[in-house]
Image (cartoon, rainbow, N blue to C red):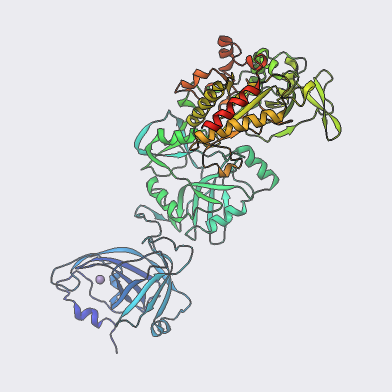
Amino acid sequence: MHDPLADYRQKRDFGATPEPAPGPLAARRDDVFVVHRHEARNLHYDLRLEHEGVLKSWAVPRGFSYSPAEKRLAVRTEDHPIEYEHFSGRIPKGQYGAGTMTIWDRGTYELVKIPSWEEALQKGELKLVMYGRRLRGEWHLVRTQQAKNSWLLFKSKDRYSGPDRDSALGIELQLAEQHDVDASLPPMRHRAEHAVFRDPTTLFEMEFTGRRCFAQKRRDGTALLGIDAPAAAPPAVIEGLAQLRCDRALLDGVLVATDASGRPCRTSLERALAAGELDDLAYYAFDLLQWEDYDLRPLPLLDRKAALRAITPNTGGVLFVDHVAGDGPALLQVIDDAGLPAAIGKRAASPYVSGESDDWVRVPVCANEPAAAPTPRRTIQAVRARFQPSNLDKVYWPAEGFTKGDLLAYYATIADVLLPHLAGRPVHFNRFPDGIDGKSFYQREVKEGTPDWVSRASVPHDGALVPHHVIQTRDDLLYAANLGSIDLHPWLSRVATFDQPDFAVIDLDPKDAPWPHVVRIAKAAGKLLRGIGLRPLLKTSGKTGMHIFVPLRPGYSYEHSKMFCEAVARVLVRDLEEIATVERNPANRDGKVYVDFLQNRKSQTIVPPYSARPVRFASVSAPLEWDELEDGELTPRRFTLQTMPQRVAERGDLFHKALTDQQDLLPAIAALEDVLKNG
Ligand code: MN
């Protein structure tokens, strides 16, 4: 009878090598594979597949690759005995295969598509699915005609295939035990908050606002689990979980919906879940507790995240939450710029434990900017008004802790300087009844049921007279604020002179452009306008931009002011083309500041000075003196609900000249033509 191990025996001296001598052939199932890393004269990997009690073997000089395009030579070698499955050791010099033999991977496999070994060997083609720690999914061995025993080994296209790497996860799994993780355990949480810090042993991640839950993938389906998990997982999340490079996984993360500006928003999430509109929800995964049947919780966080990154395709509904190692301040700056609330610092070596842990610490943005972000407070300020204000304790600025009562109190305090800028102008409301993260809607007309004492004016619109709000009194102002109209949107002209704007306005709108660019353009605009004989006024928009006003003598039309501002904008863009643009489409602005002259139109609006804005930091539109642009630490966030009353008390209404210093455009237009001509 043919002895399949004759070659193996013949090549070895079992008195000199630690390799096992074959015992009697045992009848076993064909299901074990082992890959040895063999550091011989040339490093190679030996793939061994059990069949009929022996290990069929191939030497693979360049090892494995998960890229299907990487076809690796595999040289068929002599069959090895089943005892070799657990062998590792040093084969002495002078012996066959001298060098170090270590077990690189071990697991089970099954033949697929051509399930008979006899047929596969006869055809010279094997397809197998492997279940190892490093090797997973389907692999393909094909005999070539090049040379005797010459085969090619490559990855089949499947959920595991991808970049050229030699391991499913790229981490060591020695610490991982093989059993399921109980998904009903509470998730890991921080115990305490801390000001930002640097520490090379800490990974810093963004904190995402949404619903914390586990995401589970099994062969029979996927689910979001945990007390905060929604009843049904969004289809995109289910699809994303299906695409993970594994059959089974348990992830920790947050289900997130973003608001119009792309920030995670709890209100948007709850609204979407309530309405069953799940298309835009995504699961942000930051930890991997189980992979296949391995419990990864004892592994260091750094390894779990490497594994999570390796299995996450990062498209569609499941996204990998990356981290910054060590440099907390750098990440917090990014988080702050994005208007997000906090980072989470996590000890890189920490295992995953359920419940509160000192290995995680929350690092809020606010704690690092005491000047810009007041500590949360819930004192309801008393506001006396002609009507009964409602829901004063409703939180309007969640990160800062400001309530609707704080908004009304601010407007009550600031009314004396604000009201003259609103007098006589139709005003549109943009109502945020649930605060800045809630839904909002525009209101142009006075609604039925509005108390008679509330000021209004009839505005011709499409052949009819439409009642608009006009804010004439402190009570009108508080009434608007009580409706959730956080900011105010008056026209540039007044009721008596609809077609004649009281000022020309240039709106510097940076979108994502840096604040210093806004400042540079504002300085250039001020210099240009003063150079042609005007006395412009400057204020922050309250968000991230600035507004430049030129108050006008009566008699100019919107056409005049628009043409004039367009010419100014074109000079600014000509002189500062690297940072300024008149491109209306935000997608085409290349990160430049938009110099907007199109507000100079009838029924367009612009927020007045001192208007609050529905944005983080509760910043307000702040009149500036031109030389304040020289202050390198100037930021729009300095001016808030909390700081503005004090500033007004100290400096009065820096914008009062918008009401009194009426200027003549005609000489300025002539001078501007000279500037354009002479470059
Ligand atoms: Mn070898």
In-front residue for pair 500/133: 500
Rendering coords of residue 192 (x, y %): 45, 30
The answer to whether residue 294 is above or below residue 271 is below
Q: Quadrant of the N terminus?
A: bottom left
Q: In the displayed structure, does residue 666 sit left or right of residue 13? A: right
Q: Residue furthest right?
A: 464
Q: In the figure, is residue 292 to the left or right of 463? A: left
Q: Is residue 179 visible?
A: no
Identified at 47% across, 24% down, the residue is 369
Tell me if I can see residue 426 in this picture.
Answer: yes
Q: Where ligand 1 lies, by image quadrant?
A: bottom left
- Estimate the x, y position of residue 306 in percent, counting from the top left: 40, 50
Frontmost residue, 451 versus 251: 451
Residue 621 figure quarter: top right
Q: Residue furthest left?
A: 94
Q: Nearer the viewer, residue 666 or 29?
A: 666
**Which residue is more in the foreground, 236 or 533?**
533
Q: Report the label total.
A: 0
Q: Does residue 71 lie above or below 658 as drawn?
A: below
Q: Where in the figure is residue 222, as x and y percent of width and height?
A: 57, 56
Residue drawn at point x = 28 percent, y = 75 percent: 81
Tell me: 202 left or right of 530: left
In the image, residue 80 above or below residue 489: below
Q: Where does the image place residue 307, in percent across and percent down from the top left? A: 41, 53
Q: Quadrant of residue 392?
A: top right
